[in-house]
Amino acid sequence: MAATVITKENYESEVKNSGVPVLLDFWATWCGPCRMMAPVVEELSERTDGKFKVGSVNVDEEPELASMFGIDLIPTIVAVKNGERTGSVVGVQPKEKLMALVEG
């Protein structure tokens, strides 16, 4: 399953009120490191086994969400559990680090 596109319209239902942890990938089309992270994020989104979900936030299309999370640099991956931010990493990261972020 591909990452869910997160917008300000669906943020509350898909992230804030999610029954499982969510990894949010903040990215932009013009960002080279974001393109490098895309296959890792896609692989995670296909291997969630219902334990978590992966959301994709295009910072150019959703500046309010980027601002709400204080995103200064991309790619940034943010973990959200029970509607609260629990951690984040910036830059190109290995899959294992992202799994630790969502499991932590």
Image (spheres, rainbow, N blue to C red):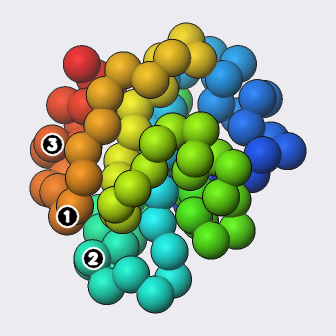
Name the quadrant containing residue 63: bottom right
Of label 2 and label 3, which has the lower sequence position? 2
Whole-number angstrom distance, CA of label 2 to CA of label 1: 6 Å
Locate the C terminus by quadrant: top left
In this rendering, is residue 83 above or below 66?
A: above
Q: Earlier in the sequence, mark 3 or mark 1?
A: 1
Left-right relation of 92 to 32: left
* Local crowd size for mark 3, using a 10 Å CA cut-off: few (<14), some (14–19), many (≥20): few
Asked whether 75 or 13 is in front, the reply is 75
Query: Which amino acid type is marked by label 1?
Result: Val
Q: Tag 2: residue type?
A: Pro
Asked where in the image residue 37 lies, by quadrant, the reply is bottom left
Decide which of 75, 93 is in the foreground and name it: 75
Query: Mark 2 touching mark 1, by CB under 8 A?
Result: yes
Residue underneath mark 3: 97
Q: Which residue is mark 1?
A: 92
Which residue occupies the extreme top position in the image?
Answer: 82
On the image, numbered disc 2 is attached to which residue? 33
| Quarter that holds the N terminus | bottom right
> Marks 2 and 3, Cα distance to the nearest angstrom?
16 Å
Residue 12: percent from left, percent from top: 76, 29
Instruction: Tell me, yes or no, if residue 98 can be seen here.
Output: yes
